[in-house]
Amino acid sequence: MTATVLGCPQEYRAVIHWRGGSKPFTSPGVSALTDVKWNRVLNDTSEAEISIAKGPAGARCCGLLGQIEPYAHELSLYRDTELVWQGPVTRVRERRAQFVVEARDITEWLERTVNATVLRYVNATGTTRRGPVQEIAETIIRLNLESGLFASEPDWPRILDYLVRDDDPTVVVFEKDGTDNSSIWFVPILRILDEELVPRGLEYTTVGRSLILGRPRTTSDPTQGRLTLDHIAGDVEIIRDGPTAATLMWVTNQTDQEISNTQFGVSGLVTPVYGRLDNLVRTQAEGLTAYDLWQLARASFTGRHPAPTALRIPEDSTLAPTAPVTMRQLVPGVRLDVAATGMCSSVSQPYRLSDVDVEWTDSGERVGVSLIPIGDPLEGDPP
């Protein structure tokens, strides 16, 4: 049986769609694409860029390229026949011989949509309740996009049908602004995810048009592939990172000017090896309870004990085509095991994929990845 590997694509295709990613607008010929760049990232918005040679594109295609409208059109990238990236066009640039299209993934729609709902995660009776942070994130997104109160139509970016959830078994409580249940926090939806829900254990990324609302992987999750240094073209660096290690993680809303009437949360496990090794985070978020701060401390402790050992793959290093993992499996957040044999620091451990950076040119495809060590969360109830 032939092993499944990353392989080498024969070509890349770029298609410009109308908003929603379904109805095509134009597609430059493969021979006109001189450079294709795209990435996948964890807890951030990925980007893509294509460069088109105007001469090989032809007059008709050139005329259509000149009509591309940011946010009215979207860019789709295909690796052979596989859709690998999709999102709204944000900028176009034209030179005498070249046309460049820049785009961001579908989380850009959440960055450009201001929250217009009261942020309370409640049941039918209006009582605050617990739930997986991934369900809370989906609820906030749906409440803002389904109503269509300030939009031309419900779900104008066409992303609700492509939400994918991987719930954390731990449930949390979320209510913005403490006991004030009638105020709306007017910020972009993506900022709510970044500032409120990611610290509570949410991980998000995109693959094609799918928005994945996931959770941090643990050692109990299956691996997507087992790599060795033979599968990495170029240099690597093993870093045992002491400054990020901790046995106790503290989170407080205390400031240097105000230490009374404040709260704190702490999570961790003191061991004989490190003794007491503290890490303190201050937050200025309003309305946080001691339980909220414990949630933040618990989530922040993951991966800090023991001292994490990271495998850094420099930008000029790439995955070899023989790497036993497909592009479909290279989703930020998934587990990848790496055995770094032949080094003074013999490392064989599970990692999480954090970034994928791809570029396609006349010389072929380069696939770079970044990996971070997996840490298991602490179990148990808050103190």
Image (spheres, grey):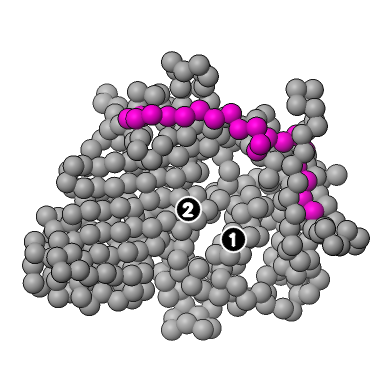
Work out whether mark 1 precedes mark 2 in sequence or the reverse, and give the earlier one. 1
Q: Secondary structure beneath disc 1?
A: helix
Of residues 365 and 225, the one drawn nearer to the viewer in this rendering: 365
Residue 193 tag number:
1
- Amino acid on which disc 1 is placed: Leu
Q: Give the left or right position of residue 198, taking residue 260 as reference.
A: left
| Magenta stretch: includes residue 249 | yes
Q: Give the left or right position of residue 293, taking residue 26 as reference.
A: right
* The C terminus lies in quadrant: top right
Say if residue 111 shows up in the picture: yes
* Residue ranking furthest to the right: 260
Of residues 91 and 73, the one drawn nearer to the viewer in this rendering: 91
How packed mark 2 is, by other alpha carbons closer than 10 Å (few <14, some 14-19, many 20 or more), is many
> Which residue in the structure is indicated by mark 2?
205
Q: CA distance from mark 1 to mark 2?
A: 12 Å
| Magenta stretch: includes residue 120 | no
Asked if 169 appears above or below 36 in the picture, the reply is above
Residue 237 tag number:
none
Q: Position of residue 310 (x, y in %)?
A: 54, 32
The magenta region covers 232-252
Question: Residue sitting at 35 percent across and 38 percent down?
Answer: 316
* The N terminus lies in quadrant: top left
Q: Position of residue 72 (x, y in %)?
A: 33, 76
